[in-house]
Amino acid sequence: MSDHDTHLAALQQGNRRPLAGYAATHFSWQCDAGVATITLNRPERKNPLTFASYAELRDLFGALKHADDVHAVVVTGAGGNFCSGGDVHEIIGPLLQLPAPELLMFTRMTGDLVKAMRGCPQPIVAAVDGVCAGAGAIVAMASDLRLGTARSKTAFLFNRVGLAGCDMGACAILPRLIGQGRASELLYTGRAMKGDEGERWGWFNRLVEPDALLADAQAMARDLVAGPTFANGITKTMLHHEWAMTLEQAIEAEAQAQALCMLTNDFRRAYEAFAAKQTPVFQGN
């Protein structure tokens, strides 16, 4: 092995870690052909989150930054519901007993989940049916794409429990998805946004029948995996980072990002396929 190959192998060993075989503890995880599916699976309670599941989700999405065998993620819930938010008995009740440092530890942990979801290069598709409330609405919000059903009900419930609507980035992200006025209404009132309303407002990319929801979300994820996945990761990064840029900064950042993508083999594959009147087969490099 040449010195170049030795150094490349050492670099990859520290920065590329397969996750397809990950064994989840607090939710279900399956991976097929580059598409990972996370299923929140406490259907008897409408799939609430706990301290432990928050932490595992945060760590998993953080690890996805280094995964070279997962190229898109689907997040869904079992039993006809997405997620009812933080578990009333395992999170809400215990929070009343915690002092300020531990409360801040908790709110930072939940915020770190959103940071990890936005920071991983894989596009995330949320498949939302039934109840999607509180932290569940935040997980859907932090995803890149959302498929819903007519019977879905999305509610940012923080106001209903005496808390501010500024939770886990909601005041930053939600207005960018549905507009300031609509976001303000949901965050001030905590009312549920029905499926057809969510589609009309741009919250959902589209509505599908409940029986087809997961299959359609996975099909969307497979389409993303079949595309230029390195370039998709750049697109996600720029969509996130450009929130805080001026137009001039964004145009320059995109010039640099696109020049980088022009160095990829996928860009050459696309050109050669076009010249040969064929469909390109992207490989993510």
Image (cartoon, helix red, strand yellow):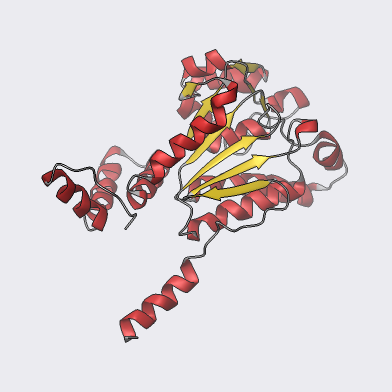
> Which residue: 47% across, 57% down?
69
Total numbered badges shown on the rendered structure:
0
| Left-right relation of 246 to 14 | left
Determine the image quadrant of residue 192. Answer: top right
Determine the image quadrant of residue 5. Answer: bottom left
> Which residue: 71% across, 33% down?
85
Instruction: Please provide percent x and percent y for residue 164.
Output: 68, 29
**Looking at the picture, does residue 262 appear above or below residue 166?**
below
Instruction: Please provide percent x and percent y for residue 119.
Output: 49, 50
**Which one is in front, 210 or 231?**
210
| Left-right relation of 9 to 273 | right
Q: Quadrant of the N terminus?
A: bottom left
Outermost residue, left side: 275
**Looking at the picture, does residue 204 appear above or below residue 43?**
above
Instruction: Please provide percent x and percent y for residue 148.
Output: 55, 24
| Left-right relation of 251 to 150 | left
Instruction: Please provide percent x and percent y for residue 127.
Output: 56, 31
Q: Is residue 108 visible?
A: no
**Which one is in front, 103 or 178?**
178
Q: Quadrant of the C terminus?
A: bottom left
Q: Is residue 214 visible?
A: yes
Outermost residue, right side: 97
**Looking at the picture, does residue 138 appear above or below residue 36?**
above
